[in-house]
Amino acid sequence: SANECVLKIFHIHTIVNKYASHVPRKVVTDLMEWIRKNMALRNEVLDDVCFPLLRAIVDLLSSRLHVEYMGDDTWVKLVTMCFNLLLKDQFNSKLSDSLDEGLGNSSEHTTDDSDSSLMETNQATSSQKRRHEQRNKYGDTRGGISKKTPPTNVQVAAMSLLRRLLTSPLAPLLSKGDLARPTAILDRMARILDSDNGFSNNMHYNYLEALTSVLSHYSLNALHLVVGFANRTWLNLVGLWGNKDQRSKEQLTIIFRTLLPYYTLSLSTETDPSPVAE
């Protein structure tokens, strides 16, 4: 029965919670893959099943060794799963699905001078249009993010897991074999801000700490994407300043310092897209 299934899932979480650090590394990957596949039935997430399984993965990753020896493929699958749960996308959606072109072309994430010049030219001609489209789609966020339905326990757990994955020192945020990864991750991080449904202080902190880690990787390696991200999310980030949690404000300060040069670049290209010929 359904109750028996939920009880078995609960027992799995209890066992993993108690013995997480003793699970052999070779077993961890298979166990996390089994957990991930059993979170949804016919692509539909069942909260009573998904929540304890998510907590089981969080418990497994509480061991630093399990995080360090996680394969690239497993990391991507777990990150994608967290984004899908937070954004209420189809559970089996891939990280590269429905990328937002407003962040730029991921294949141009090099910081060579020639590419940077091309990036700035493209940014100048399209940034104002993106700003207008963003406000039409999500509303003008100058007054802060509106409060909607509170997050579910599954979303709370997914945010906690996402923070662990993105802040890992060995997180494969950049991959030579997947040039679209920075675009996909920044797009999802922006969408989380757009769809913030009254997140708790702890969820905001987890998100901001994860974003700090992401930006530390991409600010130099994917410059044009960060310009697009700053242009798209600045107002939403400012709206979070009203959060009374001191830890969140500390993370926001780091994020503002990181993004300010990129945000001012997008503003300068809007107001003066090309030099006036003398």
Image (tube, rainbow, N blue to C red):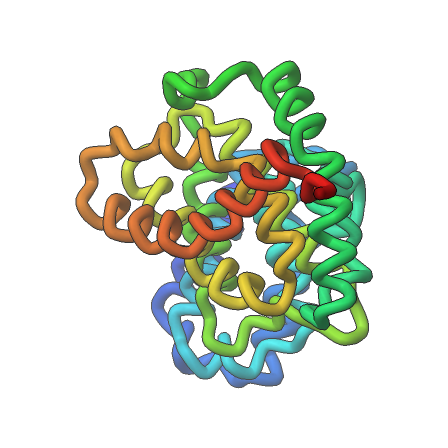
Where is 185 relative to 213, above or below? above
Q: Position of residue 165 (x, y in %)?
A: 51, 63
**Number of callouts:** 0
Q: Which residue is at 47% across, 29% downward? A: 196
Q: Position of residue 209 (x, y in %)?
A: 38, 55
Quadrant in which the N terminus is drawn: top right
Q: Which residue is at 49% across, 44% downward? A: 264
Where is 1 relative to 109, above or below? above
In-front residue for pair 58/242? 242
Is residue 4 in view? no
Q: Position of residue 204 (x, y in %)?
A: 36, 41
In-front residue for pair 108/171? 108
Q: Specify whether 225 is left or right of 154.
A: right
Q: Specify whether 32 is left or right of 152.
A: right
Q: Which residue is at 49% across, 47% downward? A: 158
Quarter residue 4 falls in: top right
Quarter residue 76 falls in: bottom right
In-front residue for pair 169/109? 109
Is residue 112 in view? yes
Q: Specify whether 248 is left or right of 168.
A: left
Q: Which residue is at 73% across, 54% downward? A: 119
Where is 234 relative to 249, above or below? above
List the single residue furthest toward the front. Answer: 278
Q: Specify whether 8 is left or right of 133.
A: left
Q: Position of residue 70 (x, y in %)?
A: 59, 77
Where is 169 relative to 130, above or below? below
Quadrant in which the C terminus is drawn: top right
